[in-house]
Image (tube, grey):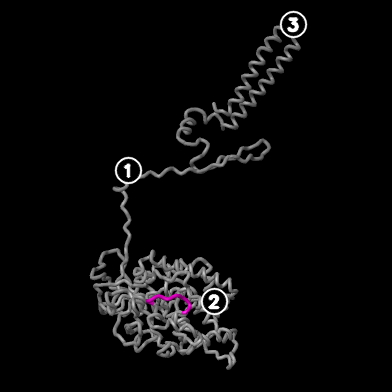
Amino acid sequence: MSCRDKPGQLINWFLRSLCVPRVLKLWSSRRPRTRRNLLLGTACAIYLGFLVSQVGRASVQHGGPAEKGPHRSWAALEAPYPEIPLDGTLAPPEAQGNGTTLQPNVVYITLRSKRSKPSNIRGTVKPKRRKKYAVAPRVQGPEALVGPSLRPQEAARAADAEAPGHVRGGNLAKAGERPWTWIRGPGARGGGADVQLPRARESNIRIYSESAPSWLSREDIGWMRLLADGAVVGLQPVRSRSGARLLVLEETARPSVPACGPSPCGLLKQPLDMSEVFAFHLDRILGLNRTLPSVSRKSEFIQDGLPCPFILWDSSLSPTSNETHSSVKLTWGTYQQLLKQKCWQNGRVPKPEWGCTEIHHHEWSKMALFDFLLQIYNRLDINCCGFRPRKEDACVQSGQRPKCDDQGAVALAHIVQRKQDPRHLVFIDNKGFFDRSEDNLNFKLLEGIKEFPESAVSVLKSQHLRQKLLQSLFLDKVYWESQGGRQGIEKLIDVVEQRAKILLTYINAHGAKVLPMNE
């Protein structure tokens, strides 16, 4: 008997114990028999009615006597929870005498049976083998550009190019494996369908996601691949104090290539100028877009094969003078006057007596911000008058350090424009210095600047500069490894982030304006 039957049993036992002695006492008393019989009949009627009600209640709750016996106990032993059905069904609601239904107040949960595991997994389950797809570009010679990127079959259907199935001299003749595909990359030189390449070289520009970072345009990625992987087919002399070499790259089918001849060229500088690669990525992240594409590359023209910065040669730049390497002749005094006149700002045509050049006023603000973060002094402070130089600095080696008395007559250097776009500057010779302490920063670079570009300042305030620099510099494999991997790159970013905080403090302290400069 369940716990729900115990209250009825207790009441039944109580009435029996109460009524039987009373009936015997009344029967043996001297009261009239009629009254005694009446009391006895009433008590028996009440007891009979109580028994009937108990039997009816038990039949409704238990569903009849069919559940009693061994069947009920076996079901209770089988199920871990007797009140919860394992088949996911719900018990029907209880019916009342007036036709209404009583909603159940029990929530039923379906329990799934545990999945039986094989006794020997190693012997019964065959592990799934992952297929790997290698890179097998096709070129004509060992010195040819290895710029094509390969993808699985689905990605190559749009390019309608399929590899014959050769891998570094091997063969993909196994049945069931998908053939490799070849997609022509920027500047790639493709061969015929029957050409095999026994030695394949991985691109030095590594992009593992579906798209490149948003601050790098498609043209930037194309030039980076060309500079990093393009085959060198010639060498042209160039007049340079730093010993830079102009390398002629393999001719491509792109008609818009800034060529130094029939083929595109790149300026290969010394290993000490490696900060130009960092400068290119910082320029793109800040939204300035004033530097030329630059990568790091190992070349046979450099002793010991050290990585060197390799910068795209742009023949559309305006001719420069031999003394200042500038397309516009400006002195420090004239430059300060131009900042006060705000030439070409808000579409205003300057007056002839203002002495304005064709360069827009906002260009000076962008250049000052960029030069301060990297501490580039070879444009606005070629005599190193705004900081304490070292023996290795160019101003000390050339003997220009004492010429700080008459700074207004000092000429600016490396101020370059494009022939078809004289309103905007092109930042060249962007060698930065990361080893300059905070108490020796060159604040002369910010002198006269009253406005700063909003795009660059917002990046400096967003706390995402480190993340973007890591993501962008990782693309250049040679540069990343030459700086000691992430640990070395993090040290360079620490310096730039600290200078960014100083620059933001300077902007707030001097009340400089932050304006959109996207004209």
Image position of 57 with respect to 160: above or below: above
Image position of 116 with respect to 232: above or below: above
**Residue at label 1?**
119
Q: How far apart are marks 2 and 3 (CA)?
A: 120 Å
Coordinates of residue 442 in the picture (x, y in percent)? 48, 75
**Residue at label 3?**
30
- Label 3 Cα neighbours within 10 Å, binned few <14 / some 14-19 / many ≥20: few
Name the kind of residue labelled 2 in the image: Pro
Of labels 1 and 3, earlier in sequence is 3
- Label 2 Cα neighbours within 10 Å, binned few <14 / some 14-19 / many ≥20: many
- Judge depth for marks 1 and 3 and give the one in front: 1
Q: Are marks 2 and 3 in contact (CB under 8 Å)?
A: no
Return the residue nearer the eye: 517 or 452: 452
**Residue at label 2?**
453
Name the kind of residue labelled 1 in the image: Ser
Range shown magenta: 385-392
Residue 431 shows up from this direction: yes
Coordinates of residue 244 in the picture (x, y in percent)? 34, 82
SS label for mark 3: loop
Name the kind of residue labelled 3 in the image: Arg
Of labels 2 and 3, earlier in sequence is 3
SS label for mark 1: loop
Residue 255 falls in image quadrant: bottom left
Q: How far apart are marks 2 and 1 (CA)?
A: 69 Å
Residue at position x 30%, y 48% in the image: 122
Residue at position x 53%, y 67% in the image: 462
Return the residue nearer the eye: 508 or 126: 508
Q: Is residue 412 magenta?
A: no
> In the rendered image, which quarter contains the N terminus?
top right
Residue at position x 23%, y 68% in the image: 170
The answer to whether residue 130 is left or right of residue 427 is: left
